[in-house]
Amino acid sequence: MTAPAADPAATGPVLTLTMNPTVDMCWDVDHLADVGKNRARVRSVTAGGGGINVARGVTRLGGRATAVHTAGREVGRRLNRLLDEEGIAHIPVGIEGETREALVLFETASRRSHHIVPPGPRLDDQEAQRCLDVLEQAVGASGYVVASGSLPGGLPDDFYAAVARRVGTAGARLVLDTSGPALRPALAEGVFLFRCNRSEAASLLGRPVRGFDDALAVNEQLLTAGAAEIAVTTIGELGALCSTRHGHTELRAPPLPGNLISDAGAGDTMVAALTVRLAAGDDPVSACALGVAVAAASVLTPGTDPFDRGLAESLRPEVGLTFRARP
């Protein structure tokens, strides 16, 4: 059965937060040579960064989204123009440092993508406070807030914890997708949904996450600690584990109708699908099933190219489900 599109009239708006956005330049090169010049063709130039990618995915799936993001200097102005041209609703927060640019190289001979990302600008305390204030004012009627992506330099490790408090006070639900030092303070505050990949899950578990049993250990740890009401751990080509107080559901990735090309942004598109379906009233497992299908469709596209919505919906019935009750 094909997943129904989210009804924009019935779906609550989703607000996203991107503290370290990018202007993503995607180039095609026939073959990366070790010596001499590599002639490239510009495939696309788009606004990027975790929350912006999520807002794009929500919109692509028929929902409504607004992206709150930092924007600094000339690259920040270009970021704003790109979002305006794409028709993504957004609220920029001006900063002194220059917004970063990222490069995605797609080698056509090998059909492999290389994502090259610099660290980005540093923010001061006043800029951090302004971002929190703008976010709080923007929540409004949004039922869901997605905080996604890395933090730029200068921000305290408890920044996402402060976001969690602001979102909770506003009566919205926080979906968190991040890594690094900011992760544990935010989880200590508690969030509605936390999505992590193998690497982030391993940092929480203290050992590699190779399969569903390891993912279950991570998610059970998160639920028991009250860090998240819903925990989703993605396990690469295997799929994902979605856990709630009722139990753990293995979602096995569908067979790909092609070779994996690039996993850039696959996690963001999964979070977009999860959130837009939760906002439309789906249960977490159904929402996660579409997320797994959308992520599968995403890895079949070069660089940061948009996923094929029709393909994603056709793959959803192929997502295998196995439920395990919690002890």
Image (cartoon, grey):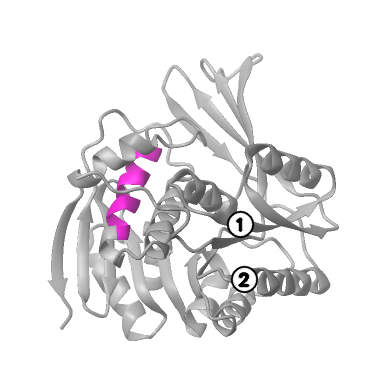
Total numbered labels placed on residues in the image: 2
Mark 2 highlights which residue? 139
**In the image, which residues are magenta?**
287-298
Residue 176 is inside the magenta segment: no
Taking the spot 67% from the left edge, 68% from the top edge, the residue there is 138
Q: Position of residue 216 (x, y in %)?
A: 24, 69
- Residue 8, position in %: x, y? 47, 53
User: At numbered mark 1, what does the secondary structure look like: helix, strand or loop?
Assistant: strand
Looking at the rendering, which quadrant does residue 103 occupy? Answer: top right
Q: In front: 17, or 119?
A: 17
Residue 301 left/right relative to 233: right
- Amino acid type, mark 1: Thr
Front residue of 66 and 116: 66
- Give the crowd class for mark 1: few <14, some 14-19, many >=20 residues within 10 Å: many
Q: Is residue 112 left or right of residue 140?
A: left
Give above or below for 208 relative to 185. Answer: above
**Cα separation between marks 2 and 1:** 10 Å
Q: Which residue is mark 1?
A: 66
Sequence order check, earlier mark of 2 and 1:
1
Picture coordinates of residue 217, whole percent (x, y): 26, 73
- Marks 2/1 in contact by CB < 8 Å: the verdict is no
**x then y, percent, for residue 303:** 51, 33
Please give left or right for residue 1 compared with residue 124 in the image.
left
Q: In the image, is residue 295 part of the stretch drawn in magenta?
A: yes
Residue found at x 43% / y 75%: 192
Image height of 202 relative to 167, above or below? above
Against 227, residue 176 (above or below) is above
Most extreme residue toward the front is: 9
Residue 321, label in figure? none
- Main secondary structure found in the magenta portion: helix
